[in-house]
Image (cartoon, grey):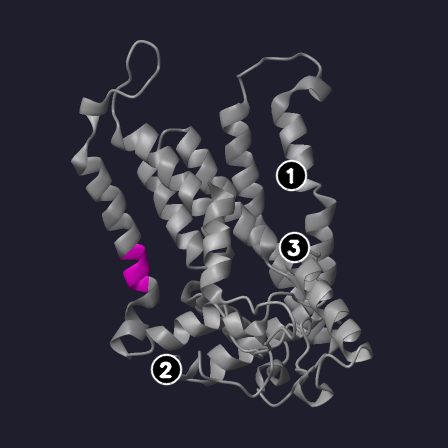
Amino acid sequence: YSTDFEVHRNWLAITHNLPLSQWYYEATSEWTLDYPPFFAWFEYALSHIAKYFDPKILVMENLNYTSRATVFFQRFSVIFTDILFTYGVHECCRWVDGKRPAKDVLEKRTFILAVLLLWNFGLLIVDHIHFQYNGFLSGLMLLSVARLCQKRYLEGAFLFAVLLHFKHIYLYVAPAYGIYLLRSYCFTANNAGGSVKWRSFSLLHLTLLGLIVCLVSALSLGPFIVLGQLPQVISRLFPFKRGLCHAYWAPNFWALYNAMDKALTIFGLKCSLLDPTKIPKASMTGGLVQEFHHTVLPSVTPTATLICTFVSIL
């Protein structure tokens, strides 16, 4: 079974057996809890169902444990939570319906959209074979988008804020959400040409959006702030010591950067320009939480990657 199958089994065990104060400290397994608190609570809820299928799922020391009951429960939990994905698709199709009426079903936007989303082969492979809950999370995303399209802005903002506290990878969409809500909700009127009427800015609307974000964040992170564990949670959510590349992930610029450093290192060793005893041993693609330094090229700091991320979004 995949590593992610064991990851989620381990998270079931962590949230079921340990008090909240230890969730983001537990390190019996190398697959530590590194998703936001809402997802941890989601695993906690699942764990109370899992115990009726196979109690051994929840034994923290049972690393890489599998059984027919374990496989059935975890696979079924993915399929069941896909109900939210289906509902999100339905709501998006409701908004699209009527935009361009068509007699032929194959020309209907709703049919095309539903087929493209519900029969997304990549999603089926990742969630149902490799094992993830991306359908459930994508359902939240689609539902949020549908609410924005339906001009239910506060509900859409609330759903997106909740999504961020389920899986923080969606942060890359946050700037687009912010700009859209500012343009469509905080500015209440347009000029004749469609441009923003600056005097129509509503401080009340901006305040309401801010309150929603703060409320959701307080529900998610509040308990850990009270416990004084926010830095620990942040360090788990953004494990900069994990490295620039992850094993088996699609390559990116950093893969080329690391490969260039490896090539220069080999060249330097061949030419006796580098001391073999000072070559870092940590793997750049292991995916585990570990720190390494480049040998020839400058080591990339978290600040540098953050700046690159913001520049790429602009």
Earlier in the chain: of badge 2 and badge 3, it is: 2
Depth order, front residue of 225/296? 296
- Which of 52/126 is in front? 126
The reply to whether the magenta stretch includes residue 73 is: no
* Amino acid type, residue under disc 1 in the picture: Leu
In the depicted view, which residue is nearer to us: 211 or 59?
211
What's the distance in space between the residues labelled 1 and 3, CA to CA? 29 Å
> Which residue carries the number 3 mark?
253
Regarding mark 3 in the picture, which secondary structure is present there?
helix
Badge 2 is on which residue?
21
As displayed, is residue 210 above or below residue 99? below
At a point 54% along the width and 78% down the height, the residue shown is 32
Query: Closer to the camera: disc 1 or disc 3?
Result: 3
- What residue do we see at 73% from left, 74% from top? 265
Callout 2–callout 1 Cβ contact below 8 Å: no
Q: Magenta segment range?
A: 215-219
Q: Is residue 170 visible?
A: no
Q: Nearer the viewer, mark 2 or mark 3?
A: 3
Q: Quadrant of the N terminus?
A: bottom right
Q: Residue furthest top?
A: 192
Judged by its main secondary structure, the magenta piece is helix
Mark 1 or 3 closer to N-term?
1
Residue 16 is situated, as x and y percent measured from the top left of the image, at: 48, 80
> Can you identify the residue that label 1 sits on?
117
Q: CA distance from mark 2 to mark 3?
A: 38 Å
Query: Residue 131's image quarter?
Result: bottom right
Instruction: Say which amino acid is labelled 3.
Output: Phe
* N-terminal-most mark, 2 or 1: 2
User: Where residue 85 sits in the image (x, y, percent)?
Assistant: 57, 46
